[in-house]
């Protein structure tokens, strides 16, 4: 049953993003898109649905990056000092999500130069298995939350199709049948006490062979053990998280070695710097690769995991030039791609790296 609800919730997340005009890439990120003058794969991140962990999660650290602050200034002329006013809206949004069953995760994020520590929140898909109405509330909150009101006030984004709900498309048609089942189940259960068979319980205790009284009452005790399955699920998720981190770190390290072998020349220097990163995998150390060519530098900086449907993202930066490297699973192996935008994707190989750097280092 849980796998079925996970599929439905994922379908719901995708439909919500598409129906209401949010950014939709390979991953399920609900992002308020930046204006057309900027890359279509960037914007204000409200929440994402992790297709590997089957959960909704926020990434509020994206609100206060230097890139985001500069972008807001370029798009709508709002200063860094004015942009800080979005903080109360972020806090209200997170508080509303918690009221729907979302739980705080991580060690918190110090927003806007440490003025306040705020916690990301997450909710697994199976949390909504018996609370589908909360997903409807979640959709309405996404369309009308304080962050949306903040950007709508700035005049550069407007939610589409507010009068329609993705929830109705994915879950609405089954609402009546679910209610009917609930009623029939209730009727059957309430019918039993009327037959006074339960009154015979004391007498069956004296005569265990009569009507199988004692035997028929033992099986329900086994259902008490069902909740004990939860801890094993939790330990499994921890193992999965550890495995995902190992894949991410190993593939990043292997990719760095390939690039160094591809660019091995006396005029090219390499350096690695260990940085602390905190994302959906928790806090951990990961290397940034610095490539120096004469007086110019190209930096490969890990940014986050579980984004755009990819395992992880690394930004490649040189002066004012920037693109992304995304790591995708490919069968039993993995493939790095150079992403300028969702419609401009290339496999990471020696030829494409040479072309990219040759173009950048001339500019």
Image (cartoon, helix red, strand yellow):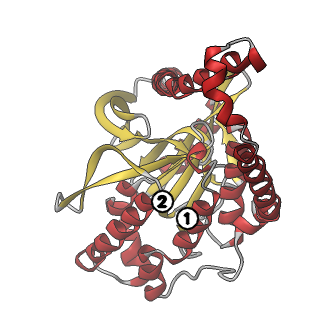
Q: Mark 1 points at which residue?
A: 138
Q: Nearer the viewer, residue 111 or 39?
A: 111
Disc 2 designates what residue?
100
Quick check: 236 left or right of 88? right
> Residues at badges 1 and 2 in contact (C-beta under 8 Å)?
yes
Vertical placement of residue 178 versus 208, above or below = below
Name the spot of residue 90 as percent of width and height, x first: 36, 67
Q: In the picture shown, does residue 271 fall above or below 65?
A: above
- Residue 194 higher or lower than 38, as above or below: above
Residue 253 in sight in this render: no
Task: Report the residue at 67% width, 43% height from top.
Answer: 6
Seen at 74% across and 43% down, the residue is 192
- Density class for disc 1 (Cα within 10 Å; few <14, some 14-19, many ≥20) is some
Q: Is mark 1 on a helix, strand or loop?
A: helix
Q: Which residue is drawn at 26% across and 73% down?
A: 84
- Earlier in the chain: of badge 1 and badge 2, it is 2
Judge depth for marks 1 and 2 and give the one in front.
2
Q: Nearer the viewer, residue 16 or 317?
A: 16
Instruction: Pinpoint residue 311: horizontal percent, then vertical percent.
Output: 56, 36
């Amino acid at each position: 049953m849980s796998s079925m609800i996970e599929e439905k919730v994922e379908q719901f997340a995708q439909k919500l993003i598409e129906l209401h005009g949010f950014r939709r890439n390979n991953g399920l990120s609900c992002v308020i898109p930046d204006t057309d003058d900027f890359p279509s794969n960037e914007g204000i991140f409200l929440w994402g649905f992790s297709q590997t962990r089957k959960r909704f999660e926020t990434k509020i650290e994206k609100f206060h990056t230097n890139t985001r602050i500069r972008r807001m200034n370029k798009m709508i002329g709002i200063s860094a000092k004015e942009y800080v006013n979005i903080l109360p809206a972020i806090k209200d949004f997170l508080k509303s999500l918690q009221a729907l069953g979302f739980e705080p995760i991580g060690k918190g994020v110090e927003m806007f130069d440490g003025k306040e520590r705020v916690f990301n929140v997450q909710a697994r898909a199976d949390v909504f298995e018996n609370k589908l109405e909360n997903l409807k509330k979640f959709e309405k909150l996404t369309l009308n939350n304080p962050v949306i009101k903040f950007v709508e006030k700035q005049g550069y984004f407007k939610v589409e199709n507010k009068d329609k709900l993705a929830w109705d498309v994915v879950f609405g048609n089954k609402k009546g049948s679910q209610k009917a089942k609930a009623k029939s189940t209730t009727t059957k259960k309430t019918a039993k006490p009327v037959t006074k068979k339960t009154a015979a319980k004391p007498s069956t205790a004296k005569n265990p062979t009569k009507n199988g009284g004692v035997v028929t009452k033992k099986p329900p005790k086994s259902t008490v053990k069902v909740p004990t399955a939860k801890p094993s699920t939790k330990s499994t998720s921890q193992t999965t998280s550890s495995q995902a981190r190992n894949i991410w770190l190993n593939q990043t390290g292997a990719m760095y070695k390939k690039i160094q072998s591809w660019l091995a020349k006396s005029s090219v220097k390499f350096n690695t710097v260990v940085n602390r990163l905190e994302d959906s995998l928790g806090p951990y150390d990961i290397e940034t690769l610095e490539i120096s060519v004469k007086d110019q530098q190209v930096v490969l900086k890990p940014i986050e995991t579980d984004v755009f449907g990819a395992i992880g993202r690394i930004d490649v930066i040189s002066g004012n030039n920037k693109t992304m490297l995304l790591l995708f699973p490919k069968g039993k192996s993995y493939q790095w791609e150079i992403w300028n935008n969702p419609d401009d994707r290339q496999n990471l190989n020696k030829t494409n790296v040479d072309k990219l750097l040759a173009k950048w280092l001339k500019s």
